Amino acid sequence: MKKIFLIISLMIFVYGCGEDEEQNIALDKFTDNGKTYSIDNFLDSNFKINKEYDVSGLENAKGVWFGFWKNNVGKALDYEIRIYSSHQLALDYGIKFVDEVIGDEAILKKSLSSWSEGIQDRRTRRDKSYGGSSANTVRAKYLHYLVYENTIILCSGLDLTYAIQNCTDLALSLESKGD
């Protein structure tokens, strides 16, 4: 009887551990499988648009949208979606603009930003310590991004680990809806 209990317990443990690993996969920062997405694909995955930005100052961009998407636990998270005609155009023309608004070294002043459209939506006043006089420090909202096919997805999160997972979750939601 003890052997049966031990075997069943071991099977539950192994199955449970394997399930967690699948949920916490992270996509490579750059993914090109030859697919092309539009904002409609994001909308089909329940992405909600708050704003569409004027992209006249963002060479080769087809569109940029700020909005939110609810993850698998129902938490609404902010994202910025940038769409280009191809993965290569996203790399060649989009990365330099994204790199300057991501993470601790982000340029968040309109006067210093290479593309200032929507800059106010890329800021947050949340501080990691949630206290002290630095609580009102302006910080970058987006801590990570993916160049996923022909899109660039800017992702928020409590820290870099969460932002990476949030990017992955939204990108994989596109796959689950088909293309």
Image: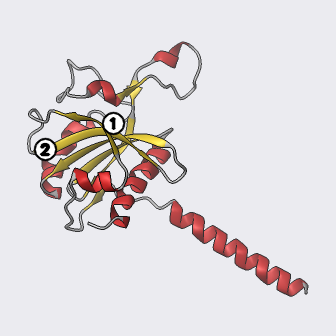
* Residue most extreme to the top: 133
**Which color scheme did the rendering employ for the protein?**
secondary structure
Identify which residue, 141 or 102, lies in the foreground.
141
Kindly identify the amino acid type of the residue bearing the numbered disc 1. Ile
Q: Is residue 150 left or right of residue 128?
A: left
Q: Residues within 10 Å of mark 2 (few under 14, many from 20)?
A: many
Name the residue tied to disc 1: 102
Q: How many marks?
A: 2
Q: Position of residue 172 (x, y in %)?
A: 38, 61
Name the residue tied to disc 2: 61
Dot 1 lies on which element? loop
Query: What is the C-alpha distance between the residues marked 1 and 2?
Result: 18 Å
Q: Quadrant of the C terminus?
A: bottom left
Dot 2 lies on which element? strand
Identify which residue, 96 or 35, lies in the foreground.
35
Q: At 21% across and 40% down in the image, what residue appears?
A: 64
Q: Position of residue 42 (x, y in %)?
A: 30, 52
